[in-house]
Amino acid sequence: MDLGLTGKTALVVAASKGLGKATALQLAKEGAIVHIVSREEQTLKQTRAEIIKESGNDEVYYSVCDITDGNAIIQAVAAARQHTGSVDILINNAGGPPAGKLMDFDDDTWQQAFELNLLSFVRFIRAAAPIMKENGSGRILNIASSSIKQSIDNLLLSNTFRAGIVGLAKSLSQELAPDNILINTLGPGKIHTDRVDQLDQKTADLQGRSLEEVQRESQASIPIGRYGKPEEFANMAVFLCSSANSYVTGQAFVVDGGMVKSIN
Ligand code: NAP
């Protein structure tokens, strides 16, 4: 299948590691011109070098951006356009919010999670959509969580704001379709990244068990019997934001090895 990504420009948010990095790498392998953002210049430089080496595509750019800062987001979108020529594809992503339950979080923590895990998505779309409208087409993919289908114990903030992303994307799929801008949401379910290791370590600490034991049990509970690899997530992400996807919009999918048991 021709994904039609050669020469397309992609802004990948929160992409110094994990799922963002894996998606940026797959896009670069498919010939896209990629711009990555996250908070630390040194890490971004290193990630850029790794993507260039692994993809053989040297059209990889970066800018430093704390995505909880609205002005920084406007600047990051402008930098992406300046470096790559446009923004054909936006991959919205963010670091995960803290784990915990109702009485663990005060208003400040709720506000921070809102700004990181929902408002940043709105802000990136608001800055990138006018560029896509000028182009007459665009693709937006939001990276959320398997909690878009089934809530996850002890992750109240994530469960709340990921649902908001799905509502946002469904509404925007209606508003942006006349401009041929398609928007979808992809929920990872235990794709092996630092985030998963950190959450498993927290579980291990709370239960007084080893990380290895917790991860063995967790992987055994997934029908496919293991955690996913970041590139397995990225393959689906890249299809949804490619030209090969011309009719799927407003949808929410999980990449989870069969972990989620809900039907919808
Ligand atoms: P990760 O390995 O922790 O990577 C997070 C990325 O976000 C890093 O590049 C980090 O870079 C960047 N970041 C964090 N805060 C930022 C900020 N304020 N501004 C800009 N960049 C920021 O996480 P991941 O596993 O790839 O997960 C990505 C998202 O999917 C997270 O929201 C996570 O909760 C969610 N998720 C993942 C899984 C999974 O199976 N992996 C499951 C459910 C949900 P810097 O720290 O250098 O800025």
Image: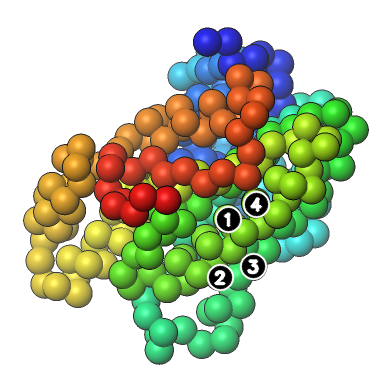
Mark before the other along the chain sequence, 3 or 1: 3
Give the mark toward the camera: 2 or 1: 1
Comparing 131 with 252, the one in front is: 252
- Tell me, yes or no, if residue 165 can be seen here: yes
| Number of the label disc, if any, that sits on residue 170 | 4
Relative to 190, is 131 above or below? above
Q: Residue placed at 45% from the left, 48% from the top? A: 187
Q: Amino acid at mark 1?
A: Val
Secondary structure found at label 2:
helix
Q: Residue furthest front?
A: 263
Give the distance between the C-alpha atoms of the residues marked 4 and 3, in whole angstroms.
Answer: 20 Å
Quarter of the figure with residue 123: bottom right
* Residues packed near mark 4 inside 10 Å, few (<14), some (14 to 19) or many (20 plus): some
User: Which residue is the site of mark 3?
Assistant: 115
Q: Amino acid at mark 4?
A: Lys
Q: x, y (%) of residue 222? A: 20, 46
Q: Is mark 4 within 8 Å of ligand 1?
A: no
Question: Are the residues at dot 4 and dot 1 in contact (C-beta closer than 8 Å)?
Answer: yes
Give the distance between the C-alpha atoms of the residues marked 2 and 1, in whole angstroms.
Answer: 16 Å
Comparing 227 with 74, the one in front is: 227
| Number of the label disc, if any, that sits on residue 113 | 2
User: Which residue is the site of mark 1?
Assistant: 166
Question: Are the residues at dot 3 and dot 2 in contact (C-beta closer than 8 Å)?
Answer: yes
Q: Residue placed at 82% from the left, 26% from the top? A: 85
Give the distance between the C-alpha atoms of the residues marked 3 and 2, in whole angstroms.
Answer: 5 Å
Relative to 171, is 115 above or below? below
Q: Amino acid at mark 2?
A: Ala
Q: x, y (%) of residue 87? A: 76, 33
Mark before the other along the chain sequence, 4 or 3: 3
Give the distance between the C-alpha atoms of the residues marked 3 and 1, in whole angstroms.
Answer: 16 Å
In the rendered view, does 28 fall on the left or right side of 61? left
